Image (cartoon, rainbow, N blue to C red):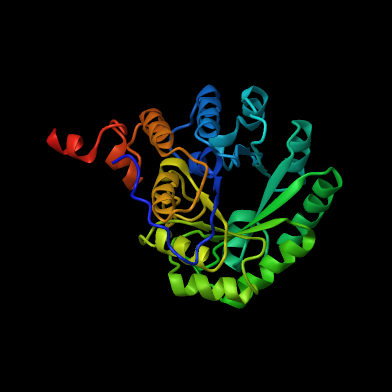
């Protein structure tokens, strides 16, 4: 089977936007440093598969994330397809300066819901991180850029344990109040469960301007995503092939795989605009360049030749 049988389920959105984070959040935690021409082809393949939001790279200091040290070079050579958004993560005003220099039209900032992770990832306190974000957002908006905000450790922190829901909401609302158009709630270490997902979305007063970003450490990413969709969320972060994690939290395993998410959504009759065989082909191609197999279960099932049937694969 190349596609799941479609059985429309009640209570779900008709269409979901998949915010593809593979080129940035995926590659930043890989041991291998991928050549810029391979990254450019990766982005092009994602657009050809139907993606309309592809987070291309990050202007973080190369000392901290050497895998993305070629951000400026990538933006200079990669093809931009009309109608496709190519946001870039910026950590601070210097990152914004570089993004503006290279004609970026959309950026993302990355905040923490916990004190310890704010210190480890941002070298800030939970409170002082906003002093860094305020001028970034204000200047970006003044230049006509759209600004997205990530909040990490929304469900739990490896040093502090469970993250209080009220604390996540406080951080998230402050970011939205700065002018961010969208807030991505990150389960950085993958400890969230469906009831927790519902409680957090409800604590925000509903799904308006919310996206979700799940890691699959405990096998909960698809269940948590389905719960978020039933709560009305229509933007889901995912990484082609399930690559990535977080370089500042060792217990953070790979992101929710785009292919696994697409298989579920298409089976539920939810439109994504994505071509699953093309995504599988891209992940198989990328895995060869990373020197390791894709952790995506769908890629593992279809990856050798996604055009073949399950019976044909089984015969070998």
Give the camera-side residue of 63 and 71. Answer: 71
Give the camera-side residue of 119 and 226. Answer: 226
Quadrant (top left/top right/bottom left/bottom right) for the C terminus: top left
Write the residue at 33% across / 50% down: 5
Q: Is residue 128 visible?
A: no
105 lies left or right of 268: right
Which quarter of the picture shows residue 83? top right
Which quarter of the picture shows residue 174? bottom right
Q: Is residue 139 above or below residue 278?
A: below
Residue 309 locus on image (x, y percent): 24, 37
Number of numbered discs overlaid on the protein picture:
0
89 lies left or right of 159: right
Residue 267 locus on image (x, y percent): 38, 52
Outermost residue on the right side: it is 142
Quadrant (top left/top right/bottom left/bottom right) for the N terminus: top left
Q: Is residue 300 above or below residue 117?
A: above
Give the camera-side residue of 289 and 266. Answer: 266
Q: Is residue 240 above or below residue 33?
A: below
Residue 78 locus on image (x, y percent): 61, 25
Write the residue at 43% across / 51% down: 261
Write the residue at 59% across / 55% down: 121
Q: Is residue 14 visible?
A: yes
Residue 241 locus on image (x, y percent): 41, 41
Give the camera-side residue of 154 and 208. Answer: 208
């Amino acid at each position: 089977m190349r596609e799941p049988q479609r059985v429309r389920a009640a209570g779900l959105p008709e269409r979901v936007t998949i915010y593809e984070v593979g080129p940035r959040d995926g590659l930043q935690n890989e041991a291998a440093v991928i050549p810029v021409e391979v990254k450019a082809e990766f982005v092009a393949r994602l657009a050809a598969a139907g993606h309309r939001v592809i987070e291309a790279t990050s202007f973080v200091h190369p000392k901290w994330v050497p895998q993305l040290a070629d951000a400026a070079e990538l933006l200079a050579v990669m093809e931009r397809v009309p109608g496709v958004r190519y946001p870039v993560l910026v950590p601070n005003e210097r990152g914004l300066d570089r993004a503006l220099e290279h004609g970026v039209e959309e950026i993302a900032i990355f905040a923490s819901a916990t004190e310890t992770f704010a210190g480890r990832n941002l070298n800030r306190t939970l409170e002082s991180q906003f002093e860094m974000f305020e001028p970034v957002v204000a200047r970006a908006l003044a230049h006509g850029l759209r600004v997205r905000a990530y909040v990490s450790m929304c469900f739990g922190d490896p040093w502090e344990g469970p993250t209080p829901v009220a604390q996540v909401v406080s951080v998230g609302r402050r970011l939205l109040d700065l002018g961010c158009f969208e807030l991505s709630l990150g389960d950085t270490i993958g400890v969230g469960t469906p009831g927790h997902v519902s409680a957090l979305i409800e604590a925000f007063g509903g799904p308006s301007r919310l996206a979700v970003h799940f890691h699959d450490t405990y096998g909960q990413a698809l269940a948590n995503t389905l719960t978020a969709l039933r709560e009305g969320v229509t933007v889901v972060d995912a990484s082609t092939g399930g690559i990535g994690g977080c370089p500042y939290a060792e217990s953070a395993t790979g992101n929710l795989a785009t292919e696994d998410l697409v298989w579920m959504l298409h089976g539920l009759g939810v439109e994504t605009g994505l071509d699953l065989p093309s995504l599988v082909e891209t992940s198989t191609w990328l895995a060869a360049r990373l020197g390791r197999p894709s952790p995506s279960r769908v890629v593992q099932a279809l990856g050798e030749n996604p055009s073949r049937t399950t019976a044909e694969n089984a015969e070998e």
